[in-house]
Image (cartoon, rainbow, N blue to C red):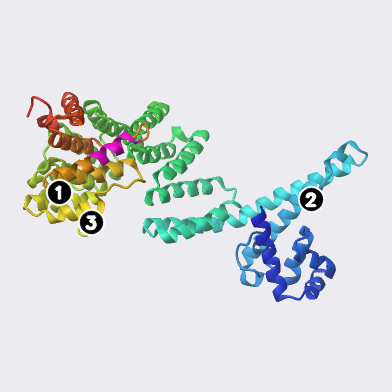
Amino acid sequence: MARSRSEFLNRLHFLSERFPQAEIARKTGTSRNNVSRYMRGAKLPVEFAAALVRGLGVNPAWLLAGEGTPYLSDVNTTTQKTAGDLLELVAAMNSVASMQLGSLTGKHHLRVLRELNDALARYQQLRVSINEKTAPIFGRILDDYWKALDKWELDRADDIRRAAEQVAKLCDDEPMNLRFERTLAYHAYLRRDVDDSITHQTRVFQRSLTQGALIDEAGMKEAYNLANTMQSVGRMREARALCDGVLALARDRGSQWPIYRFVSAISGYCQLELGELRDGMSRIMAALPQTDPRMAMNQNSMMIRALLLSGAMDMRQAAEMGDFGPAHAQGMVSWAIMLEDEGALQIALKRFIQPGAEDFTTRAARAWAALHRGDKEPARQVIKDFGQPREHGPHNERFDRAMYAAQLTRKFAPKEARQYFQAAQRAIDEAPKGVEMSIIGLANHHRTALDLCKEGKGQDAQRLETARAFFARMHENGYGALAKLAPGTG
């Protein structure tokens, strides 16, 4: 509050440096003594602020909040009118606040009630007027905001977001504010602030829920957006529970919607990642056929992942099924790395990696391919760049970085590999409750344990036992591709 008052006085001083106090007094119809008092910090009545706007052409948005340019001559007509309404709104609020409501028990209570009613009615009229004027502006800002995000112009998007936040305070249009919340969620997701993204997406979902929209396709799409964001950071159980909940709410009415089938497939995908391959694959298959081409592409990707994990399909066959977008490509690359097979890596490098791609999964695949050629240098460079895990950010990303570093290093520097293995284990141990690492990442991690801890002494004995139990459980649950790593099956 003190800072706000100081900034307001700074704006008054700005005016006094450009206009003599005598001229301010003349143009505002205020005594020079009062002008001097206001400039020294005395309480400033809203009438004087209005007089500054009328007499000196001051922009009220700048005067009251420090936003925009100091003079109305620099502001377009629409903004001038909106700013004028804002000042009237302040005046209306001020008149309500100044009323002595205690006098309602006296003889003048009817007059006071009329004044209160008139002030509140004016307040409501002004809110409606301001909303009508800001809604088109808000819409254009949101269009620009989404275009910036679509082009990954995140710095520009940050600037547009700040403008949108200010306009949102003046706009009561519910669909537009819902659109803003959804855009904020996507922006947070792109800048890898997934917790913030989930917070915004949850608000969008809750608004849909309170409006009864869960029984239509739009409401279910909001549920999918939230579930998809959750699963991207390993919150598989929450994502699955959300999917199953909205499917139950939609019931028979939604069973033919493309998004209904897609949400059902997402629930099955979460089961794959939670170690329940048979049930997960069954749900993904039951969600077919998918009539929406884009959703069909993603569901096909889920099915291919299930078939690879089950051992019913190999890398070559999966590559022949087609290309289903960046997420599928990254999944295929991570699978090739897990196999540690030169043929699979070459397929991944040729079929699924775009020229110039530099994400850490792609770089790990290239390093593995170089190791098969006997060249250790690319692996050393990758480890140098991201071998030390980040202490902040999503736990599954911290885990993946350390896991890949350990997997690569164990082939030529086992002692160093132990450091990265321990970092990956810390990422697992320190993950918040409910956060799961990917099934492929865990397979890589536990295979590294089988290699590094095979002597089974001290703490290694526990790590070895944990790894063997993991592969035994996966084999029992239908993950045939991991069977050779299970005890007694190699």
* Residue in the picture at 29% in, 38% down: 426
* Residue in the picture at 27% in, 29% down: 283
Residue 436: percent from the left, percent from the top?
Answer: 31, 34
Residue 232: percent from the left, percent from the top?
Answer: 33, 41
Name, please, the residue furthest toward the right.
107
Residue 184 image label = none
Residue 274: percent from the left, percent from the top?
Answer: 27, 30
Badge 3: residue crowd in 10 Å (few <14, some 14–19, many ≥20)? few
Q: Which residue is label 2 attached to?
A: 95
Label 3 sits on a secondary structure element that is loop
> Quick check: marks 3 and 1 in contact, CB under 8 Å?
no
Q: Which residue is label 1 attached to?
A: 348
Mark 3 residue type: Ala
Q: Is residue 109 above or below residue 52?
A: above
Residue 390 appearing in the image = yes
Real-space Cα separation, disc 2 to disc 1, in angstroms: 71 Å
* Residue in the picture at 42% in, 51% down: 187
Image quadrant holding the C terminus, namely top left
Number of labels in the image equals: 3
Q: Which residue is label 3 attached to?
A: 357
> Quick check: marks 2 and 1 in contact, CB under 8 Å?
no
2 or 3: tag closer to the N-terminus = 2
* Quadrant in which residue 225 is drawn: top left
Mark 1 residue type: Ala
Label 2 sits on a secondary structure element that is helix
- Horizontally, is 363 left or right of 227 in the view? left
Q: Which residues are magenta?
A: 422-431
Label 1 sits on a secondary structure element that is helix
- Horizontally, is 75 left or right of 90 in the view? left
* Quadrant in which residue 338 is drawn: top left
